[in-house]
Amino acid sequence: MHTLRDASILLFLFFLIILFYQLHYKSELSIPIEIPILSKSETFKIVSNEYSSLWYQKYCLKNKLSQKLVLENLPQYLNNARLSTNKICRQFATKFDALFRLEEIYGLLKLSPVYLNKINQWLHNDELLIEQIKKQRIIKIYNRYTHEEMLYNYMRSQRPQTKNEISPEEYTSKLLQDSKKNCDFCSKNYLNSTAEDRFGRLEHRLSYTAANTFKYDRWHTLVVSRNHDTLHLTEAEIVDMFELVQEWLHKAYSIEPMYTCPEMIWDAMPKSGASQMHTHLQASLGFDIYYGNIERTRQGARFYAQRNNGRNYFNDYLYIHQVLGLTIPIGNAHIIVHLTPIKDLEIMIMDEKLNKNFYKALHLVLRTFVDDLNEYSFSFGMYLPPMNESSADGHEMPVVCRLVFRNPVTNLRSDMNGLDLYTSSVIGKDRYVLYQQLKEGIEKRQK
């Protein structure tokens, strides 16, 4: 009798424990994981550094002003700053090490005489490159808070490439011309060939909205330029599109203020995945949080503030790139050739808000890539500060866009592979080379 009663008690206790764990884990899963904002956290603000990047280059990085900065020397630059007797240089190094992890490693090759002959053909019998390929220097830069990483090896840029019979310029020109014939977005075709948002269509002189027929969120629209050719937009046409985006975002937010997180994407040409050749970007409002990659950056920025006395992640991120000579200011907007790009031709533009400086910076970047570097396909992603934050108090997050040109535009082979999608970004173009190309293109257009 006692044995039966004891067994019943044990069984009852067993079920109570199971019920407790079920309720415990269910309640945990229903709570979104979010790192709180510290009350003393800085807001993002564009400020002028007391010292120029040339000063840092000379006194902290210990690079002669007559010599160009190169990415392969970044480990040495950082060591020089860490060991400097100058407090300002050491402070820079401390901020860099707090945000990034930097490694320098070597990959060694053993080559048979037969295979070496083949490599010689690829490298045009360049003795220096032959030595470099036997002992390849790899620079790893890892963002401790967004978990983005760049693996840089100059020799990746020397891989043999297939050549196409038609030039990228001819190819894109023909695509744009042919696609005009039956374009749903051109002239007045859009009135009967596109949907409207629940509050109707918004129209500007140079652009209009069209609700995406195949939505990826509740609030999701297209902002369409009246210029079919996305590769040759004027600055005024870019301004008009983004001003219309802001109007649409405020309209949607006024109807459902729980949707607070504004994001945009823009793809140009089939290489980037664009389904329509006609110029159009996509705008959306996320519910409470941003989409995954952007939210990861926001939560990483909050974690950074927690671990670094409330310092704003974006302020320090911009400062690090300014010191390293990888930013181009256009008023308060900053073009950043950042250290962890998704591919070789990615850049970033950062500012406190959308304004004329931002639009000008974007237009200058597009013109330089298309007209000078002959790149004709791009993917663009962008986020703005949350709609429910007052700009008077400053924002935790800035306006950020990331823009990557996809190449080669005529090649059927994808420019993204398993490495880029599932491991880390592998880069073969020196970030300082891209910076210099952009700087030269922008400066000549500002004269």
Image (cartoon, rainbow, N blue to C red):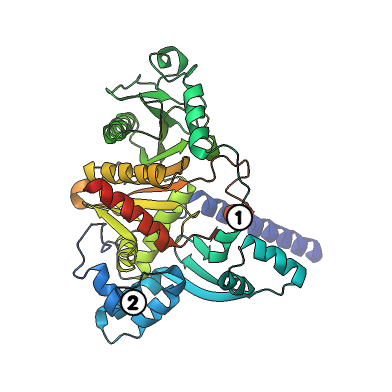
Which of 144 and 5 lies nearest the eye of the viewer? 144
Q: Is residue 163 above or below residue 184?
A: below
Residue 166 percent coordinates (x, y): 57, 37
Q: Residue at x 41, y 42 (%)?
A: 370
**Disc 1 vs disc 2: Cβ atoms closer than 8 Å?**
no
Residue 324 percent coordinates (x, y): 34, 68
Q: Residue at x 25, y 50 (%)?
A: 352
Side (left or right) of 323 relative to 283 = left
User: Is residue 264 something that shows in the picture?
Assistant: yes
Callout 2 crowding tier (Cα within 10 Å): few <14, some 14–19, many ≥20: some
Q: Residue at x 42, y 73 (%)?
A: 74
Callout 1 crowding tier (Cα within 10 Å): few <14, some 14–19, many ≥20: few
Residue 437 percent coordinates (x, y): 37, 55
Quarter holding the N terminus is bottom right
Which of 312 and 275 lies nearest the eye of the viewer? 275
Which of 330 and 214 lies nearest the eye of the viewer? 330
Which of 388 and 368 lies nearest the eye of the viewer? 368
Side (left or right) of 265 relative to 9 = left
- Residue 128: numbered disc: none
Side (left or right) of 140 relative to 231 = right
User: Is residue 35 something that shows in the picture?
Assistant: no
Residue kind at label 1, given as amino acid type: Tyr
Q: Quadrant of residue 362?
A: top left
As measured in the structure, the alpha-carbon distance from the residue carrying label 1 to the one carrying label 2 is: 36 Å
Q: Is residue 271 above or below residue 35?
A: above
Q: Nearer the viewer, mark 1 or mark 2?
A: 2
Residue kind at label 2, given as amino acid type: Asn
Q: Is residue 335 above or below residue 41?
A: above
Residue that label 2 marks: 63
Whichever of labels 1 and 2 marks the residue nearer the N terminus, that label is 2
Residue that label 1 marks: 422
